[in-house]
Amino acid sequence: MENIILTGDRPSGKLHIGHYVGSLKRRVELQNSGNFDKIYIMIADAQALTDNFDNPEKVRANITEVALDYLACGIDPNKSTVFVQSHIAELTELTFYYMNLVTLARLQRNPTVKAEIKQKNYELSLPMGFLTYPVSQTADITAFKANTVPVGEDQLPMLEQAREIVRSFNGLYGETLVEPKAVLPENKSCLRLPGTDGMAKMSKSLGNCIYLSDSADEIKRKVMGMYTDPNHIKVTDPGDTQNNPTFIYLDAFASDEHFARYLPEYACLEEMKAHYERGGLGDMKVKKLLNAVMQETLEPIRLRREELAKDIPAIWDMLYRGSEEARAVAAQTLSEVKKAMRIDYFSDRK
Ligand code: ATP
Ligand code: MG
């Protein structure tokens, strides 16, 4: 069996450091590992429209922003096929057939979708497209016969749903689709990076993000204003590092070399954490280190991004090439699906 990756992001905003540690960084490593036969990276505009249908301009504008974020982080269009979801009508057709293999009750049980519905206060105005987006995500994954999907933790229910649909399809119509597996970040802090406000997840829709494109000043302002341990009032108070986003970010980004460079009084993060936990270490010092680490990490990405942003037509060219290539692959899978379902009535007439 071929080793194929499908992964992607919704163009509902620019990408942030949660995307970077949760999925982007891993994708670049996998891309450069040489272990994969094909890598597809999808800008999920049709999925973004399920909760932004009243603002297609926002989705349109963010397609190039997300593509710039990809390239700035090291996605190489010669090694990975980057494409736009809505260009590929075959994905919608696959979704339509997969819808029959899922019940309403099953969709309503998806914990990620459930949390998102609550967060958006949809109640009775819940768009059907939004509720069914895990089914369309199954179409995205299976259209490319992907066996590997590098994602953040919030996507595990989507992968479970995809595996169920694949098993159900193959059971009913014969072995056709490939069962995918999620690849999560190895570092626990990266599974679901919290927001700068301490909310459980940094999310484009929540406005609690440090973006890959933020200026040096914005990064500093956001880091200095971050939520920490609310019970750590005086420097001498013992502090909590577990639920404290400043330490979670350091877990995700800081290395021993950073300590040697910026704060040599500690050899490593564990020593600094121990000091904070027993009391005597102020938030300001933690934030100053975090700011230095974030600046060092994000500066090269920002500079590459600024260069790439000078030629937006070249970005659309890359997306068009990738989308055409991806479309041919999805069309092949769709014809196999229709054959398996015995609805390929006119295939002999071509
Ligand atoms: P939206 O709020 O519009 O859903 P989002 O910030 O959740 O946006 P997505 O495009 O839905 O971003 O997710 C893209 C990928 O990034 C997924 O694999 C998701 O698991 C991962 N991801 C998103 N946010 C985080 C986070 N805070 N920490 C780790 N991974 C994340
Ligand atoms: Mg999301």
Image (spheres, grey):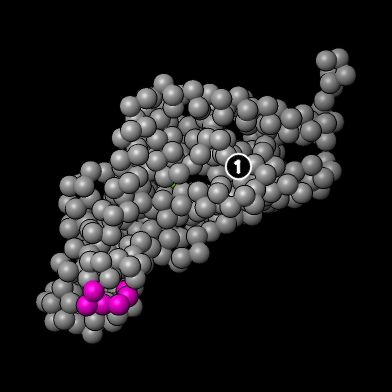
**Residue 217 lies within the magenta run:** no
Could you tell me which quadrant the C terminus lies in?
top right
Residue 243 left/right relative to 109: left
Q: Amino acid at mark 1?
A: Ile
Residue 9 left/right relative to 283: right
Q: Position of residue 218 (x, y in %)?
A: 20, 46
Look at the image and tell me whether residue 54 can be seen. no
Main secondary structure found in the magenta portion = loop
At horizontal 64% and vertical 35% (from top left) the residue drawn is 95
Q: Position of residue 24 (x, y in %)?
A: 46, 49
- The residue segment tinted magenta is 264-269
Q: Quadrant of residue 83?
A: top right
Q: Examine the rendered structure and indicate whether residue 186 appears above or below residue 298.
A: below
* Element under disc 1: strand
At horizontal 33% and vertical 27% (from top left) the residue drawn is 310
Residue 109 left/right relative to 333: left
Name the residue tied to disc 1.
39
